[in-house]
Image: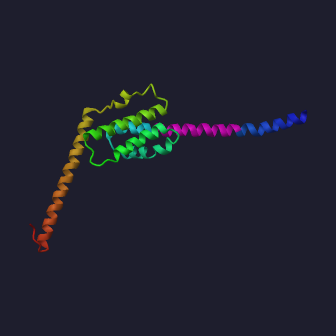
Amino acid sequence: MDKVLAVLNIIALVLVPLLVVIMGQFLQDRAEKRKDKQRIFQTLMTARIYGWTREGVEALNIIDVVFADDMNVRNAWKDLYDKYCVTNADSQHLEKIKRAHFKLLEEIANSLGYKDKITWETIQSVYIPQEMAKQLEAQVNYNNNLSVMAENMKKMMSGNNTEITGGDSK
């Protein structure tokens, strides 16, 4: 009997720390996956304001990896991706893209356990201060003006180049 207890004690001394390490690693991996999912969700929620950002595109591109175990999220991402692949989208299609983006956010929120806390209305409510919107619009206008100016300079330079080389500048 003493030998059996001794063997059980030795097994317990070896097995318990091993089980604790395995369980700790499992919990740590699970917490890390949740953090990755939350990071994607936060990035895509922010992208509602700014449109395309580098971080937003990166988040979209890792959805299939991070949410590998959630077909609802992956199907919502596939639907959004299919809508993004249309060239020359009209205003109706852009609205479909917006709704598919919101649907993806809704599925991610559900996957994270926010089903009744983050609603469709929450996802659609985007706060942009008026001054920030004005600044973003001014930046777009500035960039457009720079593009037009650069194109005009390019045309002028190519016209001057043909005169210099003796070509006809018509």
Q: Nearer the viewer, residue 65 or 38?
A: 65
Q: Nearer the viewer, residue 120 or 55?
A: 120
Q: Position of residue 14 (x, y in %)?
A: 76, 40
Q: Quadrant of residue 15?
A: top right
Picture layout, residue 59 above or below residue 155: above
Q: Quadrant of residue 126?
A: top left
Q: Nearer the viewer, residue 83 or 41?
A: 83
Q: Quadrant of residue 167?
A: bottom left
Residue at the far bottom in the pictured view: 166
> Going 23% across and 37% down the picture, which residue do you hit?
134
Answer left or right for 24 relative to 103.
Answer: right
The kind of secondary structure the magenta stretch mainly shows is helix
Q: Is residue 170 magenta?
A: no
Image quarter in which the C terminus is found = bottom left
For the rendered model, the colour scheme is rainbow
Q: Position of residue 142 (x, y in %)?
A: 21, 47
Q: Position of residue 159 (x, y in %)?
A: 13, 66
Image quarter in which the N terminus is found = top right
> Going 46% across and 38% down the picture, which residue do you hit?
73
Q: Is residue 37 magenta?
A: yes
Picture layout, residue 41 above or below residue 142: above
Q: How many marks?
A: 0
Q: Position of residue 112 (x, y in %)?
A: 49, 33
Picture layout, residue 147 above or below residue 75: below
Answer left or right for 142 relative to 53.
Answer: left
> Going 46% across and 45% down the picture, which residue do you hit?
62
> Going 42% across and 39% down the picture, which residue do you hit?
76
The residues colored magenta run 19-39
